Image (cartoon, coloured by chain):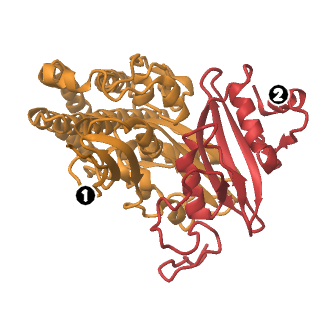
Amino acid sequence: MKAQQIITRLNKEKPDIRAEISGDSAEAIELDRAALLDTVAFLRDDEETSFDFLNCLFAIDYADRIEVLYILHSYRFNEQLTLKVKLDREKPEVESLCSIHPGAGFHEREAFDLFGVKFLSHPDLRRILMPDEWEGYPMRKDYSHENLIRRPESD
Amino acid sequence: MHKTEEFYLNMGPQHPSTHGVLKLILKMDGEQVVEVTPEIGFLHRSLEKIAENRTYHQYIPYTDRLDYVTSMTSNFVYVTAVEKLAGIAVPRRAELLRIIMAELNRIASHLLWLGALSLEAGATTPFLYTFRERELILDLFEMTCGARLTYNYMRIGGVSQDIPPEFRDRAKEFLKYFRPCIKEYEDLLINNVIFQNRTRGVGVLPLKEAVAYGATGPNLRASGLRWDLRRDRPYSLYPELEFDIPVRQSGDTMDRVLVRVEEMRQSASIVEQALDRLEKGEVRTPGINMKLRPPEGDVFMRTESPRGEIACFIRSDGSPKPYRLKFRTPSFSHVGLLPWLLKGMLIADLVVVAGSLDIVLPETDR
């Protein structure tokens, strides 16, 4: 099932969820933050989509927003789907998927650790790769540290 | 009157049976594990951040360090991701060489894992046997690219250099020698009644939990799902080659062992087929810009590493450096599975079960 068909199915079964094809990538579905939990649970349980495997999730930092991408996979239909939510860069918060895909816990901790995305109702949200007392979120584009030297651009 | 009290036990980060620097905080009730909290990050080198400061070609050696036990497959996923993003074709000979190296590395990785697992179960001898054969594979790699661990062999658009003329015969010789060795491991270790008792019905991972926690690769196949990216979402020249995908049903530690042992046989067969198909030709697409600028867009490339699914996401903004690069590594998900899987187990079993998942820490921490 392609992204457009999934949107059609979502619109039919869950009329209150607003989902659209993401502007910069044909395969991704962009969602409102509030609709994420409902959509992921629906896509997992629906007989026609059956996205039972959360492959991974990760954040990308843009100048004006932080995006979180969720890569879903259906073992039954051998389909892959990307979901995307856009978050406020000053206060990035999104619901945790731990209640639907327990494997999300570790990946969410990583996104929290490196990008500062706060996952609401996560059972154990703390730093995972960096030391506990680390300050700042190292994967953000504006992060600076005395040991981080950017190479000058040369052509 | 006996009084019992729960206590905490730190296993690792430096511990002979944690396969690197993994720390498990165990809440114990006598010998029984009540709760497991894994702590990772001791090997975090921020490889993803480094990528944002390197050109696409410059980053290849870093992928070696992602998983030093199987650098070839880490090379493989990165270069195929970049090629897909930039639309670069790869010569046929180079694709076959990549498959040969990746499958030899899969055997080497499984050998290391089998040896380490036997140590954890208390058997010392099989370790020496598996390392004896692994050495021969490393010799083949050394012949090809001069390195024994971090190969830096693949390039965007091909491989760094052709194999030396004697490689083919040496590899065939190795395969002929290696096949009976698998039987030897079975006699030495797997059919041993002590090892059987230590692993049968221990650390059972049912299919439902395996999928929910994101287990992939041999760990998923041992739980009963016939799923292999080489067959189900094919890449490179894998569709041309014939191989079986071993599956077991119960998901216990023994099944994870049997799946991997059978995979070694299949990989040996893939190497043989690929060697037979090698024809003269280019090993690298000429004329690729050293300052490669892939078009704006993103790619999510998934491949099968010995440990499971390794995937590489790259977001390009059209500049010579990736805007964002992310590795989805199998061990990361498998460490996330540990608290569920190890709960309620005896501490002696914990060591074997955690080892049977084949967790490698550098790729977990990146």
Quarter of the figure with the C terminus of chain B = bottom left
Splitting the image into 4 quarters, where does residue B13 fall?
Answer: bottom left
State the SS at label 2.
helix
> Residue at 70% across / 59% down in the picture?
B317
Tell me the kind of residue under disc 1: Gln
Splitting the image into 4 quarters, where does residue A114 fall?
Answer: bottom right
Q: Is residue B82 above or below residue A44?
A: below
Q: Report the chain holding disc 2.
A: A
Q: Which chain is orange?
A: B
Within 10 Å of the Cα at label 1, are there few (<14), some (14-19), or many (20+) other Cα atoms? few
> Residue at 82% across / 28% down in the picture?
A5
Within 10 Å of the Cα at label 2, are there few (<14), some (14-19), or many (20+) other Cα atoms? few
Frontmost residue, B325 versus A87: A87
Q: Is residue B307 left or right of residue A133?
A: left
State the SS at label 1.
loop
Residue B284 image position (x, y, % from top left): 47, 45
Distance from the alpha carbon under mark 2 to that under mark 1:
51 Å
Frontmost residue, B78 versus A18: A18
The answer to whether residue B88 is seen in the rendering is: no
> Residue at 19% across / 29% down in the picture?
B174
Q: Which residue is mark 1?
A: B14
Residue B231 image position (x, y, % from top left): 51, 23
Residue A54 image position (x, y, % from top left): 60, 37
Q: Which residue is mark 2?
A: A5
Q: In the rendered picture, chain A carries what hue? A: red
The mark total stands at 2
Q: Is residue A22 above or below residue A87?
A: above
Q: Report the chain holding disc 1.
A: B
Residue sitting at the far bottom? A146
The answer to whether residue B230 is seen in the rendering is: yes
Tell me the kind of residue under disc 2: Gln
